[in-house]
Image (cartoon, rainbow, N blue to C red):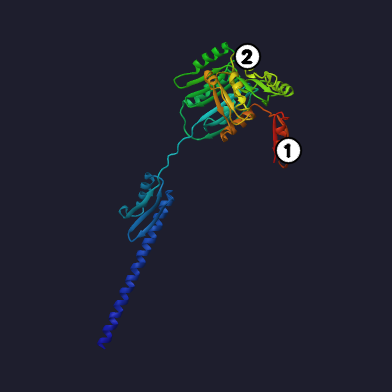
Amino acid sequence: MRLSTLVFSFAFLLAGAGLSVFAAILAVNLIEETTETDVRRALSAAGYHWADVETAGLQVFVIGYAPSEAMRFKAKSAAGTVVDATRVIDQMNVIDSVEITPPDFKLEILRTNNAVSVMGMLPARYGVDSLIASITESVGPDAKISQLLQTADFPVAENWATAVRASIDLLSLADSAKLTVSAGEIQGNLVAQDYAEGQAFERQIGILSSGDVTTDIIITAPRRVIAPFVFSVSKTEASKEISMGCRVIATSSSDAKLERLGALGAEHLINYKTHANWGEQAFELTGGAGIDLVVEVGGPGNLPQSISALAVDGCISLIGVLTGWSGEVPTAALMTKNGRLSGITVGSQLDQANMTAAVEAHDMQPVIDKTFPLAELADAFRYQESQQHFGKICVSL
């Protein structure tokens, strides 16, 4: 009997100890869960939804990615209002801050008579509508304005607004102007019709220049442009003036095409078949000043005549090589005139956007000779080869 009693007592004590341990584990788990829930609720109420909580015994671990060091400290303090602060273990990380660079606020403004195109980026607080209204007031109620503008909500230097106001004042001076405006700076050119007008422009630019705004404005006379072969220009219904004050001399081997070019606004017409030295004739037509810009599609066979027509510091834009891939170039004559020979192919996407804006702003209507469906592409090339066309040959898709 004694042995069985002893065994029974030992078993009873062992069961009691097991129950005590089990109860203790339940109590610890309950305390941990309650603490975790309370701390998580406090963090959520304070707006720290990015923070989470884990518990291990009496320790409370706050985890997550804090937006800043200050928010990290506040989240830990919020947890410390629920449990003793010494029990709070900070295991939070701070997100690396990324510095956002403000955009390059800049405007490109082009005016030809009442047509104005504006493109670029301006601060959101100044607004597109306000800028357009100011330009309209400067140019006049008949202004035709096209814009490719974007806004960004970033701070900008105070002299940005000063530069924009000064550029709008400059627009009121000249019928032809191209301006680039940035914070505290205006660059570009104005086209003056005569010396007196140029002097007036200089005086006004001096008045607008200040400590807050610097100006780099070139005042020029209308540019003379010569285009060998057919130069397809366009005009608005009310004007025959070419954009940016250009005076055009057009050349062709067809008198009929030259007549049509004259109707489109070309100032002088030269048949290069009846005038072999057409470069010399073009030079004489400018009163000895020469051509500022030659649009050259012929290539090496035409370059001697183009250089002969060129003004000092003039430019030849080579856009074609119809007379051959190579040939002799009178480099001494080009050098004597400080001339530039610039090859041009296809422009960039920005060039395309600028061209589209200019076409819309000036209501240009491209001269289209004929349109072929894609299935007749070979006929389109044969038609181009015949040189019967006047203007563009298009293919519809």
First along the sequence among labels 2 and 1? 2
Q: Residue 107, how many percent across, how many down? A: 53, 28
Q: Is residue 26 visible?
A: yes
- Looking at this rendering, what residue extends furthest in the top direction? 196
Q: In this picture, is 155 found above or below 316?
A: below
In front: 218, or 370? 370
Quadrant in which residue 179 is drawn:
top right
Numbered label attached to residue 284:
2
Residue 216 place in picture, x, y as percent? 49, 21
Report, in whole angstroms, how far the alpha carbon at label 2 lies from the one at label 1: 41 Å
Q: Classify residue 189 by image quadrant.
A: top right
Q: Secondary structure at mark 1?
A: helix
Q: Answer yes or no: do the residues labelled 2 and 1 have beta carbons within 8 Å?
A: no
Q: Which residue is mark 1?
A: 379
Q: Residues within 10 Å of mark 1 (few under 14, many from 20)?
A: few
Question: Which residue does the image show at 41% across and 46% down from the upper left?
Answer: 67
Residue at disc 2, secondary structure: helix
As drawn, which residue projects farthest toward the right? 256
